[in-house]
Image (cartoon, rainbow, N blue to C red):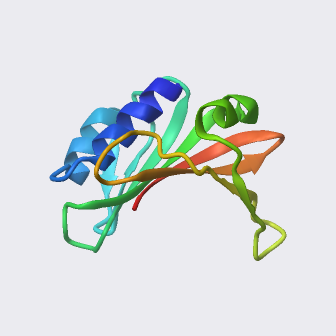
């Protein structure tokens, strides 16, 4: 599953990548809402749903991808690859703690950071943010 995440991060880091490119890589069934494209289910093993968010409504430039995983990803694996994360506490009790990893997923001109939502001792949601 992490290889699929790396592939998506690599695509997101490229200049000229489109929302359509990312949705194509995710496979599955998609629904375009204008501001984002929901993919449910995806064609990726271990990923239930994905949300590709546009930088601005009406443009085909992605800002970030949110991936809802079938099972929580062990934090030890993420930390071994991406370093010790910064912990972001939620504004509301119902929201999960977020972990922001310091090392970009790919070595490219545009950085892509991984943000993980902590649920049940693992990362249940991963956000790939284009910086």
Q: Is residue 66 left or right of residue 70?
A: left
Q: Is residue 42 left or right of residue 21?
A: right
Q: Position of residue 39 (x, y in %)?
A: 39, 45
Q: Position of residue 32 (x, y in %)?
A: 29, 57
User: Looking at the image, is 69 positioned above or below residue 60?
Assistant: above
Residue at 28 percent of width and 74 percent of height? 56
Q: Position of residue 25 (x, y in %)?
A: 29, 34
Q: Is residue 83 left or right of residue 7?
A: right
Quarter of the picture containing the C terminus is bottom left
Residue at 20 percent of width and 71 percent of height? 58
User: Looking at the image, is 122 positioned above or below residue 19?
Assistant: above
Q: Position of residue 82 (x, y in %)?
A: 59, 39
Comparing 128 with 27, the one in front is 128
Residue at 78 percent of width and 46 percent of height? 119
Q: Is residue 108 left or right of residue 45?
A: left
User: Looking at the image, is 64 positioned above or below residue 17?
Assistant: below
Q: How many marks?
A: 0
Comparing 61 with 77, the one in front is 77
């Amino acid at each position: 599953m992490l290889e699929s995440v790396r592939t998506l991060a690599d695509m997101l880091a490229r200049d000229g990548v489109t929302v359509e490119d990312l949705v194509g890589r995710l496979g599955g069934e998609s629904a375009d809402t204008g501001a984002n494209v929901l993919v449910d289910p995806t064609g990726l093993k271990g990923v239930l749903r994905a949300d590709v968010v546009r930088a601005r409504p009406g443009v085909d430039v992605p800002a970030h991808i949110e991936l809802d995983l079938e099972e929580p990803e062990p934090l030890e694996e993420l930390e071994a690859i991406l370093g010790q994360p910064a912990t972001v506490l939620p504004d509301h009790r119902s929201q999960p703690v977020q972990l922001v990893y310091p090392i970009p997923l790919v070595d490219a001109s545009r950085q892509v950071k991984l943000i993980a939502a902590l649920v049940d001792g693992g990362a249940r949601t991963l956000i790939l943010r284009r910086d």
